[in-house]
Amino acid sequence: MNANESILDKDVAETISGYIRNSSERLSAALDKHMQDTFQPENRKVLRKFSMAEAGELIGTSTSNIRKLHSEGKIPEVESDGRGRRLYTAQQIHDIRKYLAETGRNSASYKPGRWSKDDHMQVIVIANFKGGAGKTTTSIHLANRMALKGYRVLGIDLDPQGSLTTNFGYRPEIDFRESGTIYDVLTYDNPIPLESVIRKTYFPNLDLVPAGILLSEYETETALSFTQGVAGKLPFYVRLKAALETVEDDYDVVLIDCPPQIGFLTLTALCAATGVLTTIHPSMYDVASMAQFQLLSSNLLATIEGAGLALDWDFMRYVITKYEPSRSTQSQIAGFLRMTMGNDVLENEFLNSESVSLASADQKTIYEVDPSTQVKKTLDRAINSFNAVATEIEVLMQESWGRKPSDMIRERI
């Protein structure tokens, strides 16, 4: 189609819906080709290797201790770059952490996840009423960071747009056109076990439950269940909670990326949650939208509680995203939120960074990009902000397991 053609020209498209479908298929094919070109030769994403300094930070030990362990033959040698600097895969980092947990002083500090069945699996829901509030960016970066720190993580994409799924290198409309998503677990018509749709990813310790466009059918099915009845079937507000109970022993934390609405999908997630993160961009429009989101969700959840479901959240926090501290209006709004909501607002913010934008253009997080491809100062600043937010959430998780924040401090040998 050239610039002078109109979608209303019968020679261009028989119907407007046909035109839109053709456009969708062209765009989807182009995106699939772009992904294959980007991730050649595997045609799937792979995770980069990490420097010794990065490995030490993730494990919680010094580079001198890692060198000592190598020299004493207590851990295997690893690949080196052209200048002789050691490079570690994520799995090798996990292996070193495991060795220290089994043999090192203060060994318990190298075990970040659940220590026993008394430590319940954390189910953290990332939600907001408004699109563009950074929900998926928050979800994927938290999932990456926690997996690299040694937690067993399950990411669940509960948005029919499948943005989280796409971040893992999939094309939902191609890879999961008919099946293989969380919809197959939540549907009222012959649901399947959750473990059937869990996919291993290129990130050790991080699994994914994908989403696809069919997931939007859950909204309609749930609405119909109120008029047609759900005899012998679980009501919507316990469907995900029950599914997660079947994988309770396999994960330390589940991160759920919700759609930008307060529909049945979001409510289903909130009813399964042990913790809730509400992302918010520091603008008055977004603050007003969030207030409406909170009011509506509180009313709906009150109705669900009236039906007999006891919600049991360990924490609920607000996460300021896309923050630019140099902009006085954003600083003022951040201050307003903290004055109004107190400690419910996380102390640290996700910065609005060029590093995040550049990484996203390649369908990567800032933890995946090769540091040599970005300005070091800018990348480090972004990583530090994301790490700080993730650490706050880690502390909340650890406290819910009855541990003090100091228990998380790794002993520097």
Image (cartoon, grey):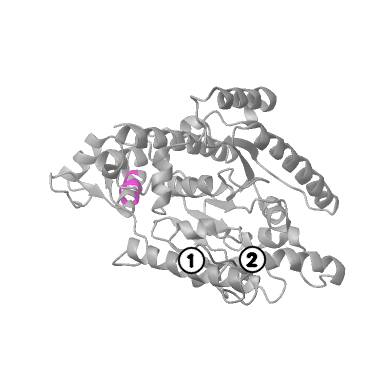
- Residue closer to the observer: 207 or 340: 340
Task: Find residue 342 and report its horizontal and vertical position in percent.
Answer: 65, 25
Neighbour class for label 2 at 10 Å: few (<14), some, many (≥20)? Answer: many
Q: Is residue 269 left or right of residue 76?
A: right
Q: Is residue 319 left or right of residue 272?
A: left
- Residue closer to the observer: 269 or 3: 3
Q: Secondary structure at mark 2?
A: helix
Which residue does the image show at 49% across and 39% down from the upper left? 390
Task: Find residue 308 and report its horizontal and vertical position in percent.
Answer: 83, 53
Task: Find residue 336 and report its horizontal and vertical position in percent.
Answer: 65, 24
Magenta stretch, residue numbers: 94-100
- Residue closer to the observer: 1 or 82: 1
Snapshot quadrant of residue 401:
top right
Mark 2 / mark 1, whichever is N-terminal: 1
Snapshot quadrant of residue 224:
bottom right
Query: Marks 2/1: CA distance?
Result: 35 Å
Q: Which amino acid, by three-letter code, is at mark 2?
A: Leu
Q: Is residue 340 left or right of residue 380?
A: right
Q: Secondary structure at mark 1?
A: loop
- Check residue 2 in the rendering and tell me which mark sits there, or answer none: 1
Which residue does the image show at 54% across and 68% down from the upper left? 23
Which secondary structure is most common in the magenta stretch?
Answer: helix
The residue pinned by badge 2 equals 215
Which residue does the image show at 63% across and 36% down from the upper left? 317
Q: Is residue 56 left or right of residue 166?
A: left
Which residue does the image show at 61% across and 31% down from the upper left? 345
- Is residue 257 depicted above or below 378 in this figure? below
